[in-house]
Each structure stands twice: as structure tokens, then as C-alpha cells.
Image (cartoon, grey):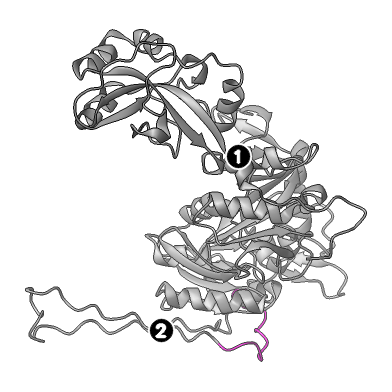
Amino acid sequence: MPAHDPSRPPPLLLDRARFDTDLTLPAARIPARACQAVVAGLKGHLFDLARQPSVVGDDARHGGGGDEAGTQKTDKPAGPTRLVMLRPAWATDAGSGGTLGAADLLAAAGSAPPPDAATTIAALPPAAAAVLASVGATPATATIRLGYAHHPAASVLRALLPPGVDAPASFETVGHIAHLNLNPDQLEHAALIGAVLLDKNPGLRTVVTKVGEISSTFRALPLRVIAGDPDTVATVTQAGCRFKLDYGTVYWNSRLEAEHARCVGDLEPGSTLLDVMAGVGPFAIPAAKGEKGCTVYANDLNPASYEWLCANIGANRVGHAVAPFCVDGRAFIRAAGGAEALAEGGPPAAIVPAPKPRPPPSGRKGGGDGGGEPPPPPRPPLPASIPAGGLVYGAAIMNLPASAVSFLDAFRGAFSGGAWAATRAGEAGAPALPTVHVYTFAATDELEEMEGAGGGKEGERRRVGGGGGGLLTAPAVAGRVVAALWAGSGNDAPTVPLGLAIRLVRDVAPNKRMVRVTFRVPADVAFWEKGGDGGGGKRARVDV
């Protein structure tokens, strides 16, 4: 981390002791043996602050005898006793009906009247008051110490950060890592912010912040570790799959989990998938391992992503169904259609461990004594190669929102290999051309959400907002997709592919949305042929 600028105030330190405050509350002294029954009977009327028991010991630490000041001393119940703390009216949250949070509680206590247990007990509903009477409860007070542990992270940071510096509103978690996007003012206090988040989130070990925009070809986030363990290798679970990755060298976004599931859910069971920008496998591995049972050819240009993709294929035991590649996405698309061969000299294919044979349960056929049928042999790994004539695949996923659209021209004329000969000839029963799912960014004012689409000629439209999955109308986005498909072709009147659909994925920034554009590759794009003069092109005759 850069040295502190002496012209600015020094970074703040985390002073946990400043949050220690004593608070005296009305209570009822009850026999220790009656605690369970009293707590159940007074549900909704107890002082129930998080990380603070509603029942405390009846000793000098809690009121020094506990009888209310200014009242005549009453007889204590026989035997060991406890103090059950009651919630006074001033400590009640008007919205939820429960106890105020620690920060609001202390603010309200400053103007609260002295605790009056007798009055508080008398105000209880008859059923709750009867519970206390049945165990011989007597009015008392209890003094507790509220401290740092009682305050959530946001409350602590609001108290510690200087005026004008907001506490971070949220963060993304990637395994044991918390990822923040701190602004310059917050960066001055990054160590403090990180320390508080580690304190308040026991599952975290590392806090990082983005220190720039994604600008590299490999989509790696420029990150700085601001607190905790500098280890950025994390393990994440999604869709029943485990992914291991180095967050400092590969792209991962936990907020895309729902979209990963939606897109995989749109795939045809048993189909072949081309994952052009696969990353560490969040689409490819669930598509192969889950109920879809797809065969996947997964590619990423980033060598680090490729290595983790290979590792995740092995860890999830889908080597028989997922073949990894590390080549340019455009070359990958054209090789899959049979238009070009992949250049040699790339990294070797992953050596994926075979599934471990599972011994039969004890007491069943084949168990215990070594008898019975042997386990089935492991399935051989899917070769990490594409046949010279291409391969028939049902869908392609292109998850590189900043630039994936610019790769769409690779589909033009790509389906010239033998795998697509029947489709090219228009034969009955020939494979359909693949569906493309391409991700991109769009400005909010380019999008409108469609409600009731299909129920009327236009459907009811409104400005887009909220969560992902909604169907959109976005002529500007569709126009960019069509222009990319025909870029450099000389076709000055391209048409929008039939069935093109645009769906919202997530909000990225106040005026920036991530969307998924889905369409089937048009035949005139798939079988386009370059013109003889080299300056234009023509569409192959297709009877499909």
C-alpha cells in the first residue's frame, strides 16, 4: 500500500473500547429453575438484542442486588435467581416491534426515563404478567455493558469514519474473500474498513478492493489486499459444483450465480455446448455435471483461467464431458464450424483424474468380502481437440460483456465444415444451427422492460429496473449485434435474426446494465461466402 500522504489526516485506528457503554434496564427477578418457562411466556416483551442474552445472572455485576432504587426492598424468591430483562417502551423499534439496534438503542437511552420495572411489568398483557406472577417474580433492574460486539459493521463504520466519508454499502464475497469497490476518500481508511469487516464476518479471511477498471485482455481485476490474509486463492460453490480460482489473476463474479443457472437452464439436455469465454467454468461445469448432461467444449484465452478450468474439471469429475482449450475466441468459433483449424502449439490438454470407484455398502451384494461385480471402469476424458470438419453443437455462450459482441463476425461463413454439410444442403432432419447467448453492456435509457409480452401485439412496456431475467426491448442493442454479425461483409442492409431476445442480467452502475442477447445463427450468416473480388460477399443458397 502506498505511504500515507502527510498533507492529509492520518488513517483512523480501530478503537473497539470506545463502544463500551453501560445500560440499565427494567428486569424481573425469577427463580433460576423457571427461566425456560418465563422466556417462552414473555416472548415479544423481552430485551432481545443480538449477542446479548435476555436472562443474566443475579449478582453484583447486574444491579448489585437488583432491587429498584427508591422502592421498598422485596423478598427474593427462594433459591438461586436470575434476572430476565424486559424491553421498555423507549427501546422498542416502531417498525419491527422488536428491540432497537445497538446504535439506536444508545441514542434513545440518553433521553429515556429511569428504569421502572414495576411499571413495565404492570403494562404487560395479562397472559405475560400471569407468567411472572406464577413464579413469584419481583421487580428489579439489570445493568449490562453494550460494546463493539453488539454493533453491526455499518454502525461501527458510521461512528468511526470522518464526516463526509460513507461506509461501504455492500461487498461481494468470493469464498473467504470480501471484495469492495472503495472510492478515493474511503481508500484513505481502507485498513480500518477491512479490519471491521473481518471482525464482523467470521467466514472472511481476506478483504480486497478494486483499484482500477478491468483493462487487460484477460479480464483480471486490479486488486489491493487491505486487511487479513493475502491469500487470494478461493473456493466457491455454485450449482452443486466447486470452483477453485485465484481471484487476483482470473475473472469471477459471485453476483452472476443466478444468471449462470438461468442460462444453463435454457440449454437442451444432452446437447453440445461451445463455451467461448469460459473463465474457470461457471457455465461449462454445471452444464456437464447437472441434469442437463451436456458435452462442453470450453475455452478461455487467459492461461491462468485455463489452468483453473482444468483443475475444476478434475475436481468436479467431468473430464468425460468437458474439453478445455486456451485459444483466441474467434479462432475457436471458426474451428467449431469447420472453417479453420486451430493453430498448434498451445498448452497441452488437461490431464483430468478419473472418478474414484465407490466401494459397495457393507452388507450388500459385493460388499465386505470382495465378491460381486467390480465397479464400472472410469469414462475416458473428452479429447481436447476439434475435428477437422467441425462439430455439431446446439448453443454457444459468450460471456465477455465488454467485447463479446465484437467476436460475432466469427460466425459469418464459419459453418463450412463437413459436420454442417447436411444443414448447408437443406436436408430434412439436418441439425439446426446453434443458438448464441452473448453478453454485453447497455445504457439504462436504451432498455425497456416488457410486461405481458406475447399477450398483445406490443406488450406493455415500462422503463427497466430491478433484478435479472426480465425480457427487454432494446433496438439499439439489437442493432449492435446485427452490425457485428455483418461487420466487414459489405452487407449494408442486414436484418435482425428471427427470435432475437434480450434479457436483463444485473445492474452494473447507475446507468449501466448487463444484458444477455439470445438468437439462432441465421443461415445467411452461417453459410456466407466471401465474394470473388475480395471486397464484398454473397450469401450461399440455402433451402432451409
Q: Quadrant of residue 337?
A: bottom right
Residues shaded magenta:
336-348
Callout 1 crowding tier (Cα within 10 Å): few <14, some 14–19, many ≥20: some
- The residue nearer to you, when weighing 240 against 47, is 47
Inspect this view and state whether residue 407 appears.
yes
Quarter occupied by the C terminus: bottom right
**Amino acid type, label 1:** Phe
Place residue 414 in its image quadrant: bottom right
Image x and y of residue 54, in percent: 37, 31
- Residue at the (19%, 79%) spot, across then down: 359
Image point (89%, 51%), residue name: 8
Count of marks, rendered view? 2
Q: Residues within 10 Å of mark 2 (few under 14, many from 20)?
A: some
Q: Position of residue 508 (x, y in %)?
A: 70, 47
Give the mark nearer the N terminus: 2 vs 1.
1
Looking at the image, which residue is at 42% across and 74% down? 318
Residue hosting label 1 = 19
Q: Residue at x 43, y 75 (%)?
A: 315
- In the displayed structure, would residue 425 be above or below residue 177? below
Q: Is residue 139 above or below residue 294?
A: above
Residue picked out by circle 2: 353
Is 354 positioned to the left or the right of 190 in the image? left
- Extreme-right residue of the structure: 7
Query: For the N terminus, which image quadrant?
Result: bottom right
Q: Amino acid at mark 2?
A: Pro
Q: Is residue 357 left or right of residue 354?
A: left
**Magenta stretch containing residue 28, yes or no?**
no
Relative to 410, is 355 on the left or the right?
left
